[in-house]
Amino acid sequence: MTHIQNIDVLILGAGINGAGLFRDLCEQGLTCVIADKGDFGGGTSAAPSRLIHGGIKYLETGELRLVAQSTLERNLLLKNAPHLVRPLPTVIPIFSWFKGATAALRTLLGSTTAPRSRGAVLMKTGLAMYDFYGRRHRVMPRHQLWSRKKTLREIPPITPRIVAAGQYYDACVTLPERLVWELLAEGMRANPASQAWNHALLEATDGDTVRLATGQGQQVLRPRLVVNAAGPWIDRVNAALGSPSRLIGGTKGSHILLDHPELIATLKGRMIYFEADDGRICLVYDYLGRALVGSTDTRDDDPDNVVCNDAEIDYFLGALRSLLPGLAFDRDQIVYTYSGIRPLPASDASNPGLISRDHSAPVAEPTGTRHWPIISLVGGKWTTFRGFAEEVADVILSRLGETRKKDTRLAPIGGGRDYPQDQQGWIRQVVAASGSEPARAATLLARYGTTAASILVAEGRNPMMLQDADYSLPELDWLARNERVQHLSDLVMRRTALAITGHLSGRDLNSIAQVCARALNWSDAQIEQELQDTRTMLASRHGVRLS
């Protein structure tokens, strides 16, 4: 007889919105299951610009509530996940003094076709507003307006066409997929009866139960409520649940990463957030020693096959050459490309960049043989996941007759728990307990936060390292055993930054496969299949061909 597990909430989709909601509901004592057809954080949540930002551009579209929420959530993440979310000084080159004011007014009044050029007067006003909205839990300096002379001194290769520049502060997330995993781990820690499953396929539903195929075997669940957090796959999942919808009108965002030491030195830890010659917004900043360049914003609705194409690569390189004519850019510098579909609400806006990044949670009430409501998480952005989760969790608690027990606003995440203000003191203490070298302890503290203590103990003194990257075999073994790794690609693409930074070599991939085989009990045939699948994915989706 099939065992049926009764649960409070089933969440389908383990990206950032689903993971944030899972953590929140578990903290309130609800029993939840979250399941994803791929790896945790492996869909759209793996393809952002890796920014945790207040959304300065949303000032133009009049989404002031979204700016207020985004700046608050940015400041909270800097406190709650300091190992993964870090301040990012940002420079905006300005090419005129007064341009754009009329267009900005038209946009505020509802236009979806206004051009995007921005002059110094408009930018000064916007930055002052941005500081105002970011005042709650402020953790970073206010903006500055640079003269042309100072801008050319600070960024010598920049085009002399500029008239000024603005500098303000946002933040970036170093390993977004790890943040997704850590939210899930926090949820399971808060309520051990809850569970997170990756590589789990939705097989069928009769309106009462939902059947999933997981690595732990077939699971039959009877939820009181279902949340569809499948991002750009939302409409497909709703159809599979017997509740067809047309909620998503996605846009494609592509990025490239360059091995360009001269550009990294020029950036000095800053992001340049700039208008390309056609008025579209681009960005470039130092991401773990590589120059991350993005992003496009074009209509697309095929999340399973989205890739950064040749035209987009040419566009990025051309935009960089125009902005920084003192530097050389070519395709040989590219170490990784990626692309994803933003799960934005369906919209008829002529400019995809003007589609709202705000979120909503429409409900499909029970009907016919379907006994539970479906709440779909539409839109949103990385930065606001906690606030979005809080809003939806409160709706769910009310529907299930429960009350909120814990506020997540100041709740630390993963390795941000007990994060030391005195980092050197923490390092001395962990070195004494593990026998590791201080430099190694500092590296892993920056990578994993306080979770590093357990990894350092597993490593011991002088651990065996990969040949071409700063990861140890015991470190990778610990991740494989403790972080729900099922496939080789989970480890090299999401639990670590090995692939995206271009530091993954063919020989190291072979070594990592052997680590996974021992930790996960793979056969020789499984090892070969995992190696082949990972190489194919890296080549076809990310432009990486390992030596």
Image: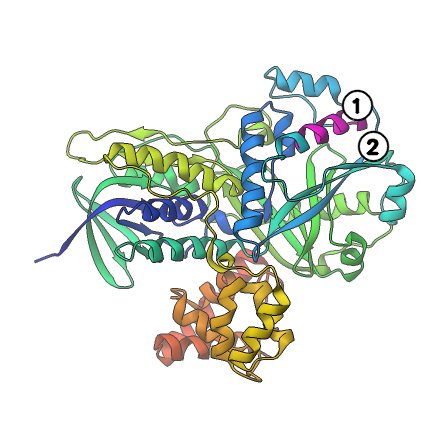
- The 10 Å Cα crowd at callout 2, few under 14, some 14 to 19, many 20 or more, is many
Q: Quadrant of the N terminus?
A: bottom left
128 within the magenta span: yes
Front position in the image: 504 or 410:
410
Residue 500 at x, y percent in the picture: 59, 60
Q: Residue furthest right?
A: 149
Residue sitting at x 64%, y 52%: 256
Hey, what amino acid is under mark 2? Phe
Q: Is residue 161 left or right of residue 16?
A: right
Residue 419 lies left or right of residue 259; in this view the side is left
Q: Nearer the viewer, residue 153 or 404?
A: 404
Q: Which mark is residue 95?
A: 2
Q: Quadrant of the C terminus?
A: bottom right
Tags 1 and 2 touching, CB below 8 Å: yes
Q: Is residue 19 visible?
A: yes
Tell me residue 394's x, y (percent): 35, 34
